[in-house]
Structures are given as C-alpha cells and as structure tokens.
Amino acid sequence: MINVLLRVFGHLSYTLVAGVIAVTLIISTILLPNRTSIGQVLSSDVVSLVDKSAYVFSLLGSLFTNFTTASAIYLFVVAILFGINISLLTFYIRKRQVASKNKKVHLTSLGGFTSAVLGIGCAACGSIVLSALLSTFGAGTLIVMLPLHGLEFGLVGIILLLFSNRYLIKRIEDPLICPAY
Amino acid sequence: MSEENNQNKSRVTESSLLLKDLLIPISIVVAGLFVGAGLYLSGGPSPFPGLEPIVAQNNEAADLTEKVQPPTEDDHIKGDLSAPIKIVEFSDFDCPFCHRFHDMMNDLTDKYPADEVAWVYRQFPLEQLHPQAPAVALASECVAEIGGNDAFWVFADNYQQARGGGDKTPHAELIPQIVVQTGVDTQAFTECFESERLFPLVQADIDQALETGGRGTPWSILIGPTGKTYPINGALPQSAVEQLIEVALQEA
C-alpha cells in the first residue's frame, strides 16, 4: 500500500493535484457560510479590487473563530483524503487507459469518484461543507438528535473515503494481466 | 459449438469481473446514498426553530436580511442609533461562538467611535441546544426593563465573559449573581423574571432572526449607511467585520 502511495505521489503532478484539491476544498468550506456577503462584495461596482480581495482573505480567519476544533480537524482530514482520492483515481485511469480501453475500468473509476464525492458530502454535515443544503432539507432536526450534532456524518465520510482510497490502491497494485478465464 | 461455448463463457467471465470491479464502489455509493437519504427523509420544516447546532450552519440560499427591523430606541444598543453602520446581532447567551463574537464586538465598538458603528443586541436562544438560554434571555430583558440599556449591557457583557471564560456555575446561581452586578432592584427583577411577562420580546427577536435567514448563532446583519444589509454568518474574525464595514461605507 505504501509502495503504491510512494509510486503515485513520487510524481510531482499527482502531489500537486492532491494539494490543490485539498486546499480548494478547505478554502471553499471556510468561505461557504458567508457566500452571500462575498457575492455582495465581489459584485460591487464601487468597491476596489484590493478591498474585495481583503474581505475574502480576512474571512479565512473564520477557521479559528467559526469552527469547533473537531469540525476543523474533520475538514482537514476529509480534504486531504479527498485530494489523495482524486490523485489515485487519476493515476489509476491513466494506468489502465494505457493498457486497455475497457469500459469497465471507466465504470469502476466512476464508482470510485462518486463514492469520493459522496464521502466528502457526508463528512460535510459535521464540517459545514453542505450545511446550507442540509438546512434546506431540514436536516437540522436529525443533526440535533445525534450525540455529536452531525459530526457522526463526518466520521462516516472519512470511513468512506478511506475505503475508497484503499480500493483504488488495491486496483493500482493489481497487475495488468488478461484473465485466464 | 466449442467456439460458441467459449464465447458464452467469456461473456459470463466478463460480467462477473465487471460486477466484482464495481462491487466495492457501488457499496460505497449505496452507503453514501443511505446517509443522504437519512438526511433528506428527516427533512421538512424543522419543528424546533433555530436548531442547527453549529454556528455556521445557516442557510443563506436567499438573502432575507433586508427583512431586518431597523434598530429603534427600544433596542439594546451600544453606540449611537444614528451611526451610519449598525450591526444587529441575534445571539444566544449560552452559545460558545456567541461568547467569541461578543468579545470581538466589544473590541470593535471600542475601536470605532460610537457615532460611526453601533451594535444592536437581539435575542436568539437555541433552546434545543442550550435549554437554559431562553431563561437567560428573559433575565436580560428584565434587567433592561428595570435598569435600562446600560444595565442590559453590564448583564450581557458579564454573562458572556463568565461563560466564555469557562464559568460552569449553574444558571440558577449565575443569573442572580450577574443581576446583582447590574445594580438593578433584585426584588423587581424576581417579579419580572418569574412572571415571564417579557418573554414575548424574546420570542419576537427569535421570529425576526428566523425571518431574516438566521439558522444558528451568532447571526448578524450589518446595516450600511444607505440601509443596504450584509449578512454576517457566525463568529467572523474582527478583520473580516472591519473589512465589511469599509465595504459598506464605500458603497454609501
């Protein structure tokens, strides 16, 4: 397993992909709760570009004021796992595409990708990514009934992502052979 | 015949391999769908207003902040009512994020002149999360009625400071202690508090918070010089609120 990770992330491009995805996800999550005011500020004709940027940048400090320690940790773990997942998936697709044009490979990859997306979505219940969506669904009712107020979904999401990553690593490890029967 | 058998065998093998390949991702997808379905099926309007527990779990899908009632002399206000920037905060006395935000707002109002930035405090106790919060809100309203605006702010500052500092004193002890610190007539306070006659004020604030889009605390609305409103969702850092003030002033 470690060998596969070293093989994939030995390539700078895959490390960059994972990093960019993780950072993008973290930033988006921090900014998401205040997207309305961000939209107001960015669409303003009279506010200078410097002030627009300063507002968005200053909102990043919400990580320290607007998150619980647990939800911040979940956010980072999920973002990193998601970044790794996408990199592994990309590596897997490329590896298999070189060897074969078999449709099942693409279907498998699609499954992994979807699961990764669902994984981050679930984790978001606790770490705020989809909080707005959850509010729309009225999921707050359920969340409050849970002992960790929704962070349980974060754990489920992390488990799903770990599972998805493990699966992808296993697929990457498999030798490219034609089945005997 | 043999070739046909081989072809059939090959098709079966391909199908089983495809199934094997897809089994785990599909399982993950199904698990994810179950979680999503669980969330979705728990949907519908929440029977418990303002239940979403984490501060930043507000729904800002639509900007409803324009529905905020303009501050009046009846509000609990720190700063001048005529200040061009007014920040209306809907707060829960027992919400840890509100303690952080309260500290920040005190620093902010210390920094800006009273005739430039005013802070309006409205009630948004989340009873399902903090069962005693409505009682604290009621106590603060009683203090305000008896002792006026200054007494209210002494109560609010001291209570938020105590809880924010980790004071775990039971509500039944802490509230009277802080009431004494405000200097109001304790007998009048007890009469007001036990009668619950000011609870409609608390409820009106809760209704206003929900109407303006608040789904968690702290939920604040910055009202600029032109009356334009900007939502402040959660306990934002001071730098962000200051930047938003600058934006509101520029847009005036």
Image: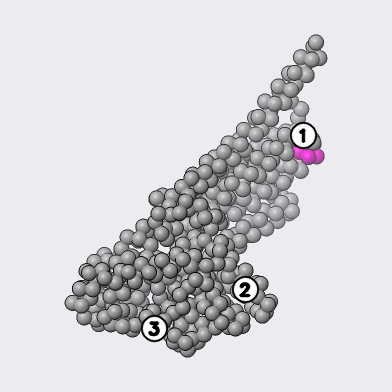
Kind of residue at badge 1: Asn
Along the line of sight, which residue is nearer the eye, B90 or B179? B90
Asked if labels 3 and 1 share a chain, the reply is no
For the residue carrying disc 2, how many other residues have a C-alpha within 10 Å: few (<14), some (14-19), or many (20+)?
many
Disc 3 designates what residue? B73
Counting from the top left corner in percent of width and height, residue B90 is at: 43, 70
Frontmost of labels 3 and 2 is: 3
Report the Cα–Cα distance between label 3 and label 1: 73 Å
Chain of the residue on which disc 2 is drawn: A
Counting from the top left corner in percent of width and height, residue A84 is at: 64, 49
Which residue lies at the image location 38% right of the left edge and 69% below the top edge?
B204
Q: Quadrant where the N terminus of chain A lies?
A: top right
Disc 1 designates what residue? A102
Chain of the residue on which disc 3 is drawn: B
Q: Dot 3 lies on which element?
A: loop
Chain of the residue on which disc 1 is drawn: A
Counting from the top left corner in percent of width and height, residue A147 is at: 39, 50
Report the Cα–Cα distance between label 2 and label 1: 49 Å
Counting from the top left corner in percent of width and height, residue B74 is at: 37, 80
Asked if labels 3 and 2 share a chain, the reply is no
Question: Residue A41 got which mark?
Answer: 2
Q: Is residue A34 left or right of residue B169?
A: right
Kind of residue at badge 3: Glu
Residue stretch in magenta: A96-100
Q: Is residue A130 above or below residue A111?
A: below
Q: Is residue A127 left or right of residue A6?
A: left
Query: Residue farthest to the left?
Result: B187
